[in-house]
Amino acid sequence: MNFIYSDTRTIIEKKIINAAIRNTWTVSDIFNEEKDFVSSYKSESERLKWASILVSLAFGENTAFHGFGSRIADADDISTKSWLCAHLLDEAKHTEGFSKLLDYLYPSNKQHHSKLFHSKDVLLFYGYTHRCDSIVKWLLCTQIAEVFGRYCYKSLHSSLQDDVIAEKFLKNIIFDEARHIAYINALIKTKQEKMDATTWSKNIKPFIEKMIPLGRNMFEARKKGNNYYALKHLDIDVTGFCNLAEVELRNKFLD
């Protein structure tokens, strides 16, 4: 096992990771643990119409949190290892925060959020991610989920601004997601530069082509699905934000 690593991080990568380390928002900044908050924004029955997408996002954050440990061990450079450690802490914070948010929005299902989870497409995407046979493919899956997720979070943030707690929580996650996307993009580009063009073209690009539609399906499945209708209840243009996410990913990795 290596215990000495060359620091190959660029200046931009160092700035991003330093910003991540300095980021000090905590779950208790948003959810006062001494109080049992319940949202007064609409009724709980009305809020249940959006439950599936919020629980799907919570599932994604939790799955990423649990998946990072082995990938940190697999990484063979200090930039990847150090970033994944910082990213892991964000995923832990997001997972904890979503548990609080779901209790706050759905008190009748407190600590039983899995009852609200009905997305086979989310399970399918993260199943592929879990089985990735290289850290490059795993980083690409993570990036696909992050990009689609950021557009979804931005749309949710705009729609839920009348709920002070949900608005603050989602705003903090959006800032985190921006850093995640920037750093993972840098890692992937570095690994691509070290890979011969034939391997990238014949092995990696087809994998990206397969995973982008699966990432999109988490929000806009071929038969629309629960998450699509949950977002539509919030007057969110699901096709619109999925198109933007797909264009961004294709521009980064396929064009």
Image: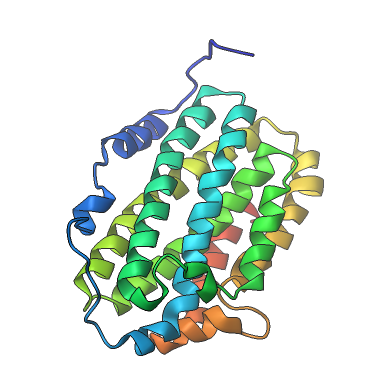
Residue 213's place in the image compared with 226, above or below, is above
Q: Quadrant of residue 212?
A: bottom right
State which quarter of the image contains the N terminus. top right
* Residue 203: image location, x then y, percent: 79, 46
**Nearer to me, 76 or 117:** 117
Residue 166 to residue 8: above or below: below
In the rendering, at what x and y percent does residue 20 appear? 33, 39
Q: Residue furthest top?
A: 4
Q: Is residue 151 left or right of residue 5?
A: left
Q: Is residue 234 above or below residue 131?
A: below
Position above or below: 202 against 246: above
**Which residue is drawn at the image coordinates 23% and 75% (left, top)?**
163
In this orientation, does residue 93 appear? Answer: yes
Residue at x 66% of width, y 61% of height:
125
**Front-lying residue, 53 or 144:** 53
| 215 to the left or right of 50 | right
Q: Percent x, y for residue 229?
A: 51, 86
Could you tell me which residue is drawn at 52 percent across and 61 percent down?
59
- The residue shown at (62%, 49%) is 140
